Image (cartoon, grey):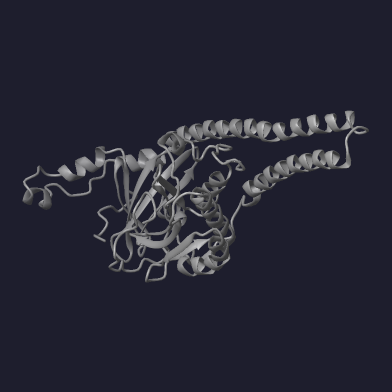
Amino acid sequence: MRPLPWGRPPRPNDRLFPSPAKTGQESGLAPGTLDDILQVIDIGILTLDLGARQTGYRNAASFEILGDTEAPLGYPALHRLLIEPLRGEDGSIPLQGTAAQRHGDRILSLSLFRISPEGCCLFIRNITEKARLESIAQAVNTMDNIGFIFSGIRHEIGNPLNSIKVTMTVLRNNLENFSPAQIETYIDRTLGEIGRIEFLLRSLRNFSMFESVDCTIVDLNELLGDFIPLIERDLDKKGIELRCHLAPTPLLVRIDQRALHQVLLNLVTNAVDALAGEKENPHLVLTTYQRENLAQLIVRDNGCGMTEAQAKHLFQPFNTTKANGNGLGLVITRKLLALMTGSVEIHSREGVGTTVTVSLPLLATTAVPEQEREPEQGGAE
């Protein structure tokens, strides 16, 4: 880092460049122009010398955002506030990183860039209002989902309960007149409705099973290799061809293996249902792929696909087109992936098929090898 120009803590009116600024003159700009720009933008900019444990440059916005115009924070306080939240798991300070940090009644967005082995530059934003609005939006969305859930529970449990009530009432009123075979039919009907309720309760248990995840470092290729034998026999019995394409290099991700197994089971189950009674050559394709800093797991089928209207409500609780479904599978899938900093995208065309892409952050980025082609969207080839 350049020598610090101040013999005291920096103040809001301190200048980055002495006037006249040589760099400004050479570029045809008026003296101090770059410094003037940095002083008026609403993003806080601050440099720290980690070796000398000193504060370097600070623009006016950094004082306003941190609220220390009258009594500037010293290096130790700035280090605790701005650097510590960005440390990696091994305690090191990354070459670049981002984090959110609470400072009093404010929420700050921090972006760090190492500009030398001992020097770093920080960009600071006050995102308190943004976070408040996002919190409100999330609360509204949560209440909407809770409304859907309770409405769904009332429907999913109410219907079989009503059926059980009618069945048992008829049986009680005709117990002396019914033959043993007729009584057995009514009992079987009641047990079937009880089974529907049990299925719903198991699904709700799965929804709350992973309130937290226990993540470890896993090679996505290895996990998929272990998963395939679990589904091969069942797919073969249903006449569905399974194809698998693994990335040629390891894809290391930090995940909860149980949670990702549940995600895969949900997605494969959906694909199998979509392939039921469809084409002469039903097949399911599982692919792992590296896209920049993401590991992607793609589940693609050539089943019935979906209309645009159906696709809009995919992640709405209890929304389903299946005769025996409950509409919680994809809701659980998205929740589990969010807990692992992952995401899911679905592209579908009616009569063509569906492609589901699961994306997870790569721990160690490897060179992207030449591959035949990027996985397609839509249906399986």
Tell me: residue 319, above or below residue 363: above
Q: Nearer the viewer, residue 114 or 15?
A: 114
The structure residue drawn at horizontal position 90% and vertical position 33%, both measured from the top left corner, is 175
Q: Is residue 179 left or right of residue 297?
A: right
Q: Nearer the viewer, residue 196 or 334?
A: 196
Tell me: residue 82, above or below residue 125: below
Residue 51 % position (x, y): 36, 65
Q: Is residue 163 left or right of residue 360?
A: right
The image quadrant where one finds the C terminus is: bottom left
Q: Is residue 260 visible?
A: yes
Residue 252 % position (x, y): 44, 66
Toward which corner of the image does residue 75 lie, by quadrant? Answer: bottom left
Residue 307 % position (x, y): 42, 37
Q: Nearer the viewer, residue 302 or 26?
A: 302
Residue 228 % position (x, y): 52, 66
Q: Is residue 358 visible?
A: no
The structure residue drawn at horizontal position 51% and vertical position 67%, both measured from the top left corner, is 223
